[in-house]
Amino acid sequence: MISMYSSKPDKNGELEEEADDGNVEYKLKLIDPNATRFEHLVSQMKFRLLEGQGEAIYEIGVEDNGFPKGLSDKELEDSLKTLEKMAKKLKAEITILRKREGEIGKVCEILVRKLAEEDFNEIRVAVTGNVDSGKSTLVGVLTRGELDNGRGLARMNVFRHKHEVKSGRTSSVSLQILGFDSRGEIVNYSTLKNPMWSEIAEKSSKILTFIDLGGHEKYLKTTVFGLTGHRPDYALLVVGANMGIVGMTKEHLGIALALKVPVFIVITKIDICPEHVLQQTIDQLTQILKLPGANKIPIIIRNQDDVIVSVKNLTSGRIAPIFLTSNVTGENLDLLRQFLNLLPTNKNWEELINKPVEYQIDETYLVTGVGTVVAGTLISGTVTVDDILLLGPDEFGNFREVKVKSIHNKRLLVKRLVAGQTATFALRKIKRSAIRKGMVLLDKTCKPKVAKGFEAEILVLYHSTTIQPNYQAVIHCGTIRQTAKIVDIDKGTIRTGDRAKVTFRFLYQPEYLKEGRKIIFREGRTKGMGKITKVIYE
């Protein structure tokens, strides 16, 4: 897939040649177009917004070949007026990102974003990093708009359980949202002290869902589930400036890279860290990011230009932006907020909307007065209220019909859900005990087959001895988490660093799998990763 923000300046300020697809449009000038030309420009903008799932970048004063010629102040002013009229016609708003000098005048970069309607643009960010690095505090500060007091005030808003409040450590997957309106203003920081999710969702054109994961080794299974089951678009790796790269930091980075999730890094606590210790942490991080397994170009974000360049190139997988922040003084948090506002949708969900329904269940609830409720992500298709779907597989591999009573997206009652969105469904006439994590809801017209096992091409990341047939490990694939046994290895035995084709068989119950899906297997710590090449049916 082409990066959503595909324009990238070279050292002379020139951009790559304009691409036919993607959501970036170059325009030298937009001055007094006639009616026919204006309609054509509006159609073009509609296409770019569709490509960017509600967001587009316009480069004004730039030729089609990427040369930044520039415009006079008057020409630029007139061009921006035309652009604003075009956006208004499509119920969108424009925000100037930056102005810079071209060859003979100014070049302007503009964000065009659709106004909030029933469907908002959702981006999921998994927050990872070692225990005590400041993950929950960072999420608390970003979503509440209030700085921390240095003693854990901000993270109290994020914790879900009493023991987490007491210990100051996250043990479960905690979800928090940050809403941006069409102008890029943060909706959470409105007049209300603590706005409800539904109030944020109603006013937002774009919502970031932070999936706050546990940093302690004993919660690794929950962290891996968060990275596989919640299908994040990005991973935010939090590193304490005073701690450096310790504990689970490398492990979390390795899992995100294995799942091909673009990573950006936030170094916290720079207010209490001596300069030489901070430099050591940056050097350690840079060293790891440049290793062959990661192969990233680290970019320290110091100004708005760095923000825009890094956002444009993040989905290419080649760069790793690094923010140096403090949750107590607020240093550089504005740059991080600008970056989050501009984060592009990482997956092309648009083409999956018309495919058959597949909804992966990651949580179940029993709600008084409502009944059984499931939470999860819609991987493909569109679901509307009163749809009949197939739920399964149960322990015997069977599916049963269920009816969707209601849909809540970010606790806002909606009539439909499209591919790429997370939501809860209230299901009619089904007991909570009959549903488990890892089950799916499928289109009622499909005839699903269930898997007893699968073949996968794997890479062993770390194992102290050799791995041979009969070895058992926990498999993570999407929301599936189950122990499986290796029944065959094409090389006989494998060890750390080896690649092989391996056959796994589930120990307890069949699962719904598809070829091409990524897996992680672990036994305590992560042991390896791979990709399913063949599903073995009953």
Image (spheres, rainbow, N blue to C red):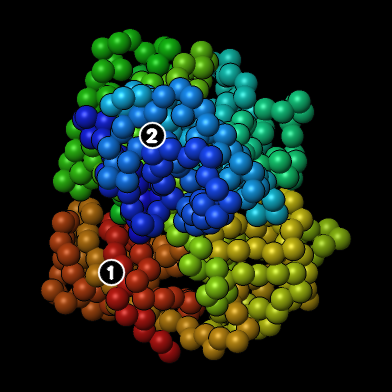
Q: Residue at label 1?
A: 471
Circle 2: residue type: Gly
Can residue 34 be seen at all in this image of the molecule?
yes
Q: Where is residue 448 in the image (x, y as percent from the top left)?
A: 52, 85
In terms of sequence position, does the residue under pointer 2 or pointer 1 come before the other? 2
Circles 2, 1 touching at the beta carbon (< 8 Å): no
Lateral position of residue 295 relative to residue 378, left or right:
left
In the image, 16 versus 392, the foreground residue is 16
Can residue 218 be seen at all in this image of the molecule?
no
Q: Position of residue 150 (x, y in %)?
A: 54, 16
Q: Quadrant of the N terminus?
A: bottom left
Q: Where is residue 54 in the image (x, y as percent from the top left)?
A: 55, 50
Residue at the (49%, 61%) spot, across then down: 349
- Label 2 or label 1, whichever lies nearer to me, is 2
Residue 531 vs 311, above or below: the answer is below
Q: Secondary structure under badge 2?
A: loop
Residue at the (36%, 81%) spot, across then down: 535
In the image, 74 versus 215, the foreground residue is 74
Residue at the (53%, 40%) spot, across then down: 32
Q: Secondary structure under badge 1?
A: loop
From this viewpoint, which residue is outermost toward the right? 369
In the image, 61 versus 288, the foreground residue is 61
Circle 1: residue type: Tyr
Q: Residue at label 2?
A: 61
Residue at the (64%, 37%) spot, across then down: 181
Q: Crowding near pointer 2: few (<14 within 10 Å), some, many (20+)?
A: many
Q: Where is residue 469 in the image (x, y as percent from the top left)?
A: 23, 74
